Image: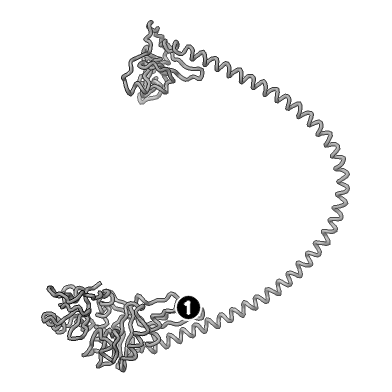
Amino acid sequence: MIKRAECLCDGKIIGIETIYTVIDGNQINIKEKLEWVREKGRKNELFCPCGCGANYVVVAGEKNLREQHFRMKPGSNPEKQCTYVEEGMVSVNSKIILKCWLDEKIMPKDLESRVPICAVDDSSRKYEFTLLSRERGIAVNYCCNKSNLSSEKMEILDQNSRGIHIIHIIDNQNSGTTLQYPEGAMKVQERQGYCLFLSIEGFEYQKARMIAAYYGKDIDGYWRENIFADGLLSDFWIDNSGKLTISGQTLNALKDECKKRFEEAQEKEKTRRIKEQERREQERLRREEELKEEEKRRQKEREEAERKFREEQAAQQARWEEDLQCREEERKKAEQWNDLFATHNRMKREKEEEEARKKQEDENRKKEEEAALWTKFKATLSEQLSQQEKQVRDPSGTRWIRCAYCGKEDVESAFSSYGGKGKINVGVCYDCSKTHTYTSKAEEPTVKPVVKYDPNVCPECGGTLRRRNGRNGPFMGCCNFPRCRFTRNIKE
């Protein structure tokens, strides 16, 4: 948003666009106008247009034209709260560009900006002309947003213009169509005959473009935008009567041609659709005739099929009666075979039941033997763990260890370490390995165990030695690696 794009001076509104003009296509400041506005500001003759009484000064930088605007004079205290409404940057820049355009095309000496309608005719409404030249009888009504194009405003502008030719221009962001009725654009088209859309890049006059479009409703009821003129804003001229031209042709003439082409295209499409509808109707009738012929053919086929079906049904009935007698004989034979199969199956089932009974007895006996082994193992577990000559394993093959601290007897997975020379069945459980506060309750062997050399048993932990391959060749390593790192070379 740009700050304060207008001010009140000598009872009239002055827009920031009044200090611009164009020479040979180049947009520049008007030195005399700029100095006049500055002098007015120094004399405290520029005021806020909202009526708060605050004094304004003009800010016009030479290096950056975007900074040119009015601002409240330092030390100026408004009599009441300021209600000035900021104007959008697109709207301000568009008014600057349109001011330069009129300066170039009609070279008016009395061009005013933001002229209220009451200054032209007897009306108390606050609507205004964006730009007005009373001498040339030409005015521009610019609207940044088509939603602000009220019918009341346009009617008042038309009724109170006193012979002034009004050019209505809308910002390009409002162009295009969604196939719905373009209410805002149609308000302009009903008065001007077409719509003008201004497209800008920043505030540079040389890059501004404008398109002229005509809106029409097609045969489907959709509203279409038909662009009949498109070019730089500087390509559009204004003749003495206020009519716009481009490339030597008036926009009214170009619009009439565009409207004629659009209506011809709609009429052509209408004719094409009528012919297409006739073709489809003929196709429908032809198809109906084909369907009738197809139905007759199918009816004949159904009658012939019914005749053949009755003949085949009679022949089938005869075969069924003949087969019935054969099936009765087969049924009797089947009953005899069924009796034989039943007897065979009963004997087979009795045999399988006897085998299952014997198998169950064997399984029960095996479980009893295993239970006896476990009972015997548990009864002699302490005694077995007291000797340190061989590992103690239960009937399932799991190794058992006794804790050297607390005397706990459990499987090897419950110990953090176990085995070693003279302590094959002694280890340290996980609880004792954490605390180290328990005293040993395990009974120390009273007799030094006889060490028997076994090449497959680790002499350090009592684990099983296995053949492994290393960087220097094969060797024997302990199965408790990495807890036990005992190795023995193999001589080959």
Name the side, left or right, on which 277 lies relative to 456. right
Report x, y in % for residue 353: 70, 25
Image quarter of residue 47: bottom left
Mark 1 residue element? loop
Relative vertical location of residue 406 with respect to residue 294 in this rendering, above or below: above
Above-or-below relation of 2 to 187: above
Is 104 on the left-hand or right-hand side of 159?
left
Work out which residue is located at the far top of the displayed protein and give it: 447
The quadrant of the image that shows the C terminus is: top left
Residue 229: in sight, yes or no?
A: no
Going by the numbered disc 1, the residue's amino acid type is Tyr
Q: Which residue is mark 1?
A: 222
Q: Is residue 469 left or right of residue 88?
A: right
Question: Which of these two is toward me, 70 or 127?
Answer: 127
Percent position of residue 445, x then y = 38, 8
Of residues 331 and 149, the one drawn nearer to the viewer in this rendering? 149
Q: How many marks?
A: 1
Is 77 located above or below residue 161 in the figure?
A: above
Residue under the point 76% across and 68% down: 297
Residue 266 seen in the current view:
yes
Quarter of the image where one finds residue 234:
bottom left
Query: Which color scheme did the rendering employ for the protein?
Result: one colour
* Pointer 1 local density, CA inside 10 Å: few below 14, some 14–19, many at least 20: few
Residue 215: image location, x then y, percent:
42, 82
Which residue appears at 55% of the width and 15% of the height? 372
Image quarter hosting the N terminus: bottom left
Residue 335: x, y in percent? 83, 36
